[in-house]
Amino acid sequence: MRKAILIALILAAVAVTASVAAPLGTGTFHDAASMLTRTAVKVSLLFVWLVAAIVVTLASGREVRYSSIEVRSAPLHTFALGLVAVTSYVLTAILFSYLIPYFVGLPLLAVLALFALLTKIYGLIAVFHAVGTLAAGIRSREQLAARRWLRGDLAMVLIGVLLLGAVRLIPIAGTVVWGIASIFGVGTALTTKFGRREPWFLTWRTVEAG
Amino acid sequence: MTDACQRYLEDPEGHAGHLAVCEKCRAMEEILGSRVHAQPIRVDALPLAPWEQAAYRAWPVVIGGMLAVLAVAFAICRAAGISPLTAIVAGMSAAQMRAYVTSAADALRGASLAWQIVFGAAFVVINAVLVVLLRRAPRGIDA
């Protein structure tokens, strides 16, 4: 059943891509060249994402796994937090840009950009892991014993990058899916505090004498 | 309960012979014995934990995947007539985002006081919601 759904999805993606890339009777040579350039940019960036994902997973695999589990166990909260966080980034960036004439705006903007970039990169790698695990994760000990190569965090991240990267090549839907994945990524990076599972804020409690 | 029964309860293995002569203790032993079913733990029957085999590094899959993506990127870049490095630099450019933010800031500077207050209120509300959402502990492995 899962295989049939997967094949149907791939065929639908191919049909959509083909119809957008080469619409019947209306496409020009310039459109095709522009489409090819966009695809070249996306595939080259996919390679960069792949390298970044492997490096981050090798450096902190456990954290990436925790964040990936969070995406799968609490998707609604993760998405809501990601949406609010992205909106907050945009509003804060506008506010800091507003403050540029007062000299404090520029360094604040640089720090915000760096934090937003780190959140997106780490979070999207966690989403790659989640997608890879959903698509090709091991579900029983028999599967675990039978698989020789296709197991472990690195393989799951790789599968996730390839799947989401392939979906991203679809002209309109790909951009939407990649954007949604980014929102999930920002959400899970912030929810789990980059996989460390520590609270962001300390709670105030009074000491009670026993 | 007799003294012999008491001694048996305190040290059942040392006074195992008591069971042969005392019907009460034999009945109690049967009741206790029938309720205890010691079973060995079957690890294979337990569900798979997320961290099992997670640290395994599938280098052949990783290297194969990277080489495949690299080959496809080179082929498409060659067909498009641009170098892969140019494509990466073009893809990473944040010029569009920067232009949006700058134009929004310019618009805010030129807006009326009422709109600036509305923006400030939206900023405070969104960040308050963000803080509320961040206070919730992650579910993750506890789910």
Image (cartoon, rainbow, N blue to C red):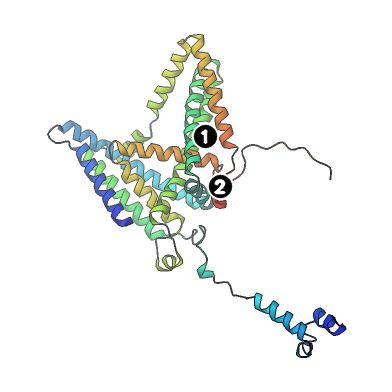
Which mark is drawn over residue A48? none
Query: Could you tell me residue A93's position as x and y percent?
Result: 49, 25
Query: Between residues B65 and A165, which one lies in front from this camera angle?
Result: A165
In the rendered view, would you say A176 is above or below A3? above
Task: Identify the image quadrant of residue B6.
Answer: bottom right
For image coordinates 55% across by 32% down, the residue present is B130
Which mark is drawn over residue A115? 1
Pointer 2: what residue?
Answer: B139
**Do marks 2 and 1 both belong to one polypeptide chain?**
no
Left or right, B88 with respect to A88, comes to: left
Query: Between residues B123 and A40, which one lies in front from this camera angle?
Result: B123
Query: Could you tell me residue A28's position as x and y percent?
Result: 15, 32
Query: Between residues A134 and A197, which one lies in front from this camera angle?
Result: A134
Query: Could you tell me residue B134's position as x and y percent?
Result: 57, 37
Instruction: Tell me how far mark 2 sits from mark 1, CA to CA.
Output: 24 Å
- Judged from the image, the secondary structure of the residue bearing numbered disc 2 is loop
Query: Between residues B59 and A71, which one lies in front from this camera angle?
Result: A71
Tell me which amino acid carries mark 1. Phe
Q: Chain of mark 2?
A: B
Please state the total of marks drawn on the protein image: 2
For image coordinates 31% across by 46% down, the residue present is A166
In the rendered view, would you say A132 is above or below B130? below
